[in-house]
Image (tube, rainbow, N blue to C red):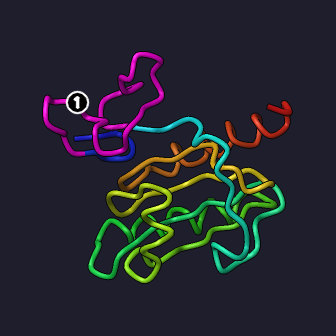
Amino acid sequence: MNPGFRSEKAPGGNLCGLVNACAGQDGSCDRPGWCVRVRDGDKRLGAAELGADLGERATLVQFSSAFCAPCRATRRILGEVAGLVPGVTHVEIDAEAHLPLVRALDIVKTPTVLVLDADGRVVRRAAGQPRKADVIAALGQAVRIQGSGS
């Protein structure tokens, strides 16, 4: 059905409605089923919010819930990527146990993955179970954004 992160159709047929914004300039998805918000304003997360230290280069933050089958697969994929890329950390957060943070970040489904740069800025976010290649690409973009000073 989908090569990347999955999203359900929102009213009106917009695949990205559940994550509020997408990679396309016109609000469209860059490919079917792959919905990513490129920047999340100036939102920053740190050890206090995450309950763990940030990665030296980037952090993969996963919001999960107890009975979410895609969350288990996402945990495995993000853990593998964090193990492959030096300076990258994977942090999993139980959405139900951290409702104020979930609300503040507008997390509407699990799994939702946030890619943070070294300073804790949310530079990518997507909902659904990812493919490893999609996570690596998003991570590469995040490190590139951080390196460019923007």
Q: Residue at coordinates 56% horizontally, 35% vertically from top-left?
A: 38
Amino acid, disc 1: Asn
Rendered location of residue 33, percent (x, y): 31, 37
Between residues 13 and 133, which one lies in front from this camera angle? 13
Left/right placement of residue 40 relative to residue 94 reads right
Q: Is residue 58 above or below residue 53?
A: above
Rendered location of residue 140, percent (x, y): 69, 40
Q: Residue at coordinates 77% horizontally, 35% vertically from top-left?
A: 144
Judged by its main secondary structure, the magenta piece is: loop
Q: Residue at coordinates 69% horizontally, 41% vertically from top-left?
A: 142
Q: Is residue 121 above or below residue 137?
A: below
Rendered location of residue 105, percent (x, y): 49, 57
Which element type, helix, strand or loop, lies under badge 1? loop
Magenta part of the chain: 8-34
Q: How many marks?
A: 1
Rendered location of residue 96, percent (x, y): 37, 79
Query: What is the crowding at mark 1: few (fewer than 14 residues within 10 Å), some, or many (at least 20)?
Result: some
Left/right placement of residue 143 relative to residue 137 reads right
Asked whether residue 127 is drawn in magenta, I would say no
Between residues 6 and 123, which one lies in front from this camera angle? 123
Quarter assignment of residue 58: bottom right
Q: Which quarter of the figure is the C terminus placed in? A: top right
Q: Which residue is mark 1?
A: 14
Q: Residue farthest to the top?
A: 26
Left/right placement of residue 118 relative to residue 65 reads right
Q: Which quarter of the figure is the N terminus placed in? A: top left
Left/right placement of residue 117 relative to residue 35 reads right
Quarter assignment of residue 107: bottom left
Quarter assignment of residue 128: bottom left
Q: Residue at coordinates 85% horizontally, 37% vertically from top-left?
A: 147
